[in-house]
Image (cartoon, rainbow, N blue to C red):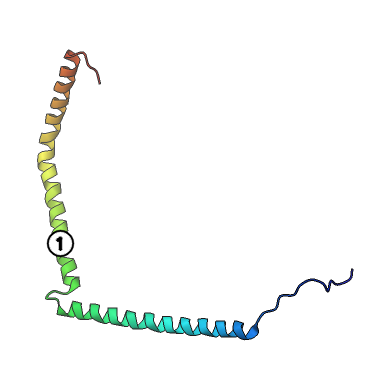
């Protein structure tokens, strides 16, 4: 086989290619610098906000967890005390509803 010399060759403007690569690199560095500056500003503002609070977030979290545990314990205690009274009542209501449905010729 003989090499083809009649095929069109791709010609790249190397100056334009290098210039574009340099601009993209500079843009990436500037973007990263902007992201860093923004992060520093947001973190600084958050730290100042936490410093100005009357109660530190860890103490607030402990207090809220204690409140949630107390509420859960109260709910469980109420369920244990009153749950047994509700169960037979619900069963008797279901039985009376079934009897009413049967008397009207309806079935479930």
Instruction: Please tell me in which quadrant of the rendered image residue 35 appears.
Output: bottom left
Is the residue marked by circle 1 packed among few (<14), some (14-19), or many (20+) residues within 10 Å?
Answer: few
Using the image as rendered, state which of residue 33 and residue 78 is in the foreground.
33
Using the image as rendered, state which of residue 42 and residue 80 is in the foreground.
42
Using the image as rendered, state which of residue 99 and residue 88 is in the foreground.
99
Q: Does residue 22 lie above or below 79 as drawn?
A: below
Q: Assign the C terminus to one quadrant of the image.
A: top left
Residue that mark 1 sits on: 66
Q: Position of residue 3 (x, y in %)?
A: 86, 72
Residue 95 shown left or right of residue 9 in the figure: left
Q: Residue at x 13, y 48 (%)?
A: 75
Q: Secondary structure at mark 1?
A: helix
Residue 22 shown left or right of residue 11 in the figure: left
Q: Does residue 39 lie above or below 83 as drawn?
A: below
Q: Does residue 25 lie above or below 78 as drawn?
A: below
Residue 15 shown left or right of residue 5 in the figure: left
Instruction: Please tell me in which quadrant of the rendered image residue 54 appears.
Output: bottom left
């Amino acid at each position: 086989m003989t090499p083809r010399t009649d095929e069109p060759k791709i010609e790249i403007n190397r100056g334009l290619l290098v210039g574009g690569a340099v601009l993209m690199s500079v843009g990436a560095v500037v973007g990263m610098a902007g992201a860093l500056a923004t992060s520093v500003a947001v973190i600084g503002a958050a730290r100042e906000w936490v410093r100005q609070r009357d109660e530190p977030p860890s103490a607030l979290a402990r207090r809220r967890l204690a409140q949630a545990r107390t509420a859960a314990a109260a709910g469980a205690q109420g369920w244990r005390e009153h749950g047994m009274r509700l169960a037979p009542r619900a069963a008797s209501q279901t039985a009376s509803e079934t009897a009413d449905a049967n008397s009207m010729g309806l079935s479930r």
